[in-house]
Image (cartoon, helix red, strand yellow):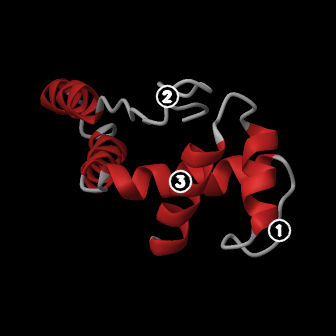
């Protein structure tokens, strides 16, 4: 995921869009029609989609924050003021309040 819908200076909500149910349905359909050679790979893909679907929206946002920080080369403490600054550098439309809220989620949900 490269961006999260709802980011702007005028609002502080973050809407995570997930379509794992659509992907899971497509994989189930592919599995139903798969040759024996294709089945192991499709079964592995289905398992990955199921495990990803089990992740909460808060965990998803925390992963997004860490990915955005990595994208700007931030390697410091996620709980620091520098992390908020780096997050806002990565996402200029992010308000300070939203950046702090997202930072708190990232700190609370370390992988």
Q: Mark 3 points at which residue?
A: 102
Q: State the image coordinates of residue 78 (x, y, percent, origin top left).
A: 68, 70
Number of numbered markers = 3
Q: Name the residue under label 2.
A: 11
Of 108 and 18, nearer the camera is: 108
User: 32 left or right of 53?
Assistant: left
Q: Name the residue under label 1.
A: 75
Q: State the image coordinates of residue 32 (x, y, percent, origin top left).
A: 12, 29
Residue lying at the far left of the rendered structure: 32
Instruction: Identify the residue at image location x=80%, y=52%.
Output: 86
Q: State the image coordinates of residue 31 (x, y, percent, origin top left).
A: 19, 33
Instruction: Identify the residue at image location x=16%, y=24%.
Output: 29
Q: Classify mark 2: residues with Cα within 10 Å, few (<14), some (14-19) or many (20+).
A: few
Labels 2 & 3 near each other (Cβ < 8 A): no
Mark 2 against mark 3, which lies toward the viewer?
Answer: 2
Q: What secondary structure is found at the residue carrying circle 3? A: helix
Indicate which disc, 2 or 1, sits on the residue closer to the N terminus: 2
Instruction: Identify the residue at image location x=83%, y=68%.
Output: 75
Spatial CA span between label 1 and label 3: 17 Å
Q: What secondary structure is found at the residue carrying circle 2? A: loop
Quarter occupied by the N terminus = top right
Q: What secondary structure is found at the residue carrying circle 1? A: loop
Indicate which disc, 1 or 3, sits on the residue closer to the N terminus: 1
Instruction: Identify the residue at image location x=24%, y=40%.
Output: 36
Labels 2 & 1 near each other (Cβ < 8 A): no
Spatial CA span between label 2 and label 3: 13 Å
């Amino acid at each position: 995921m490269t961006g999260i819908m709802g980011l702007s200076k005028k609002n502080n909500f973050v809407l995570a869009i997930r379509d794992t149910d659509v992907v899971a349905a497509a994989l189930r359909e592919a599995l139903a029609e798969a040759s024996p050679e294709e089945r192991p790979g499709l079964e592995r893909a289905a398992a990955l989609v199921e495990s990803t679907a089990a992740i909460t929206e808060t965990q998803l946002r925390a992963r997004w924050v860490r990915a955005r920080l990595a994208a700007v080369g931030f390697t410091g403490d996620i709980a620091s003021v520098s992390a908020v600054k780096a997050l806002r550098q990565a996402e200029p439309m992010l308000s300070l309040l939203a950046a702090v809220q997202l930072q708190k989620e990232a700190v609370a949900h370390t992988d």
